[in-house]
Amino acid sequence: MLVQQSLVETTVPLVSGGWLSGIAKQIEHAFAPAREAIVPILSSPTVVGIWAVLVLVSVGVLWWDLRKNNQAIASMMRGVWSLVVLYSGPFGLLIYWYTGRTQISHDSLWRRGFRSTAHCYSGCGAGEVVGITLAQGILALGTAYVAGVTFTFAYLFGFALTVGPLMQDGVGFKEAMADALYSETPSITIMEIFAIGTDLLLASQAHMGDILFWSALAFSLSVGFVVAWPVNVALVYFGVKEGMSNPAKMGSQSTAGG
């Protein structure tokens, strides 16, 4: 009964009035079968409970590996990987294991793309969590306002994760901001269009006390990561982004220094 109610609630139009309403209705109609299949799963306490355990185990494995085998990884990337695994559980841990450890056999474009996406994802994901929680969960704003507020927080957090380290390295604020706008905007935009869109499609009428509110948020974050990865690969390939440093080199330097 609760699942049926959730399905009914999530069919409320995302935007009302004008051409945006027409687009929203078309999107809702196109993705209705997927939504009807996903919402009951995300509303299941058993499924969410199992996922929570997997996330905790994944974070534990990550921290154990960082402490025991990968102390050479910079503190910022330790924080990045912690957030990635916290957001996406085993999926995030798998990405770290094959692209972010000092033990990787070789670096490649797709690995650099994953690390670049992870860096963007950690900041934007935090912004999305804050935005959705504040705008939808606490203030109960309309869908359009929720989207606008969440986009704003995602951009702020995403840019901060780029601008901050650059300024610490001596780069001026204007130059650092220009670099962030140039290199991060495409990735953040694509990531958040799909992440926020997915969350609102699945749980636009959910409240903070509903399981669906949090499970849809977690699910949408991973969707954003997946669609942003090829964008980051392209940005790295064309030199728009440098991509994060090869962790294997950090490991070799640490070994040589020891």
Image (cartoon, rainbow, N blue to C red):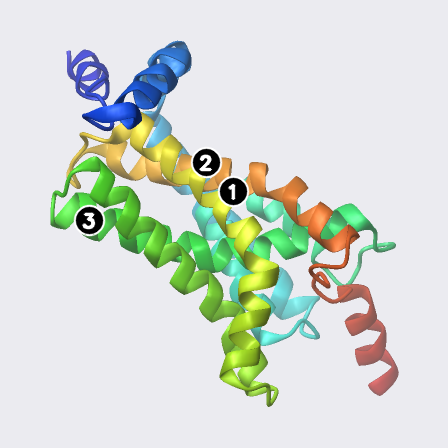
- Residue 170 percent coordinates (x, y): 60, 90
Q: Is residue 63 visible?
A: no
**166 w.r.t. 155: above or below:** below
The residue labelled by disc 1 is 190
* Number of residues whose C-alpha sits closer than 10 Å to that of mark 3, classed few (under 14), some (14–19) or many (20 or more): some
Name the residue at the bottom extreme: 170
Left/right placement of residue 13 relative to residue 169 reads left
The amino acid pointed to by label 1 is Ile
- Residue 211 percent coordinates (x, y): 24, 33
- Residue at coordinates 45% horizontally, 48% vertically from top-left? 87
Name the residue at the left extreme: 139
Q: Is residue 179 visible?
A: yes
Secondary element type, mark 2: helix
Marks 2 and 1: in contact by CB < 8 Å?
yes
**98 w.r.t. 251: above or below:** above
Cα separation between marks 3 and 1? 21 Å
Left/right placement of residue 25 relative to residue 231 reads left
Q: Nearer the viewer, residue 205 or 61?
A: 205
Q: Nearer the viewer, residue 2 or 128?
A: 128
- Residue at coordinates 87% horizontally, 55% vertically from top-left? 106
- Residue 240 percent coordinates (x, y): 70, 59
Cα separation between marks 1 and 2? 6 Å
Cα separation between marks 2 and 3? 18 Å
The residue labelled by disc 2 is 194
The amino acid pointed to by label 2 is Phe
- Residue 205 percent coordinates (x, y): 18, 29
Q: Which badge, 2 or 3, comes first in the chain's sequence?
A: 3
Q: Quadrant of the N terminus?
A: top left
Which label belongs to residue 135? 3
**124 w.r.t. 7: above or below:** below
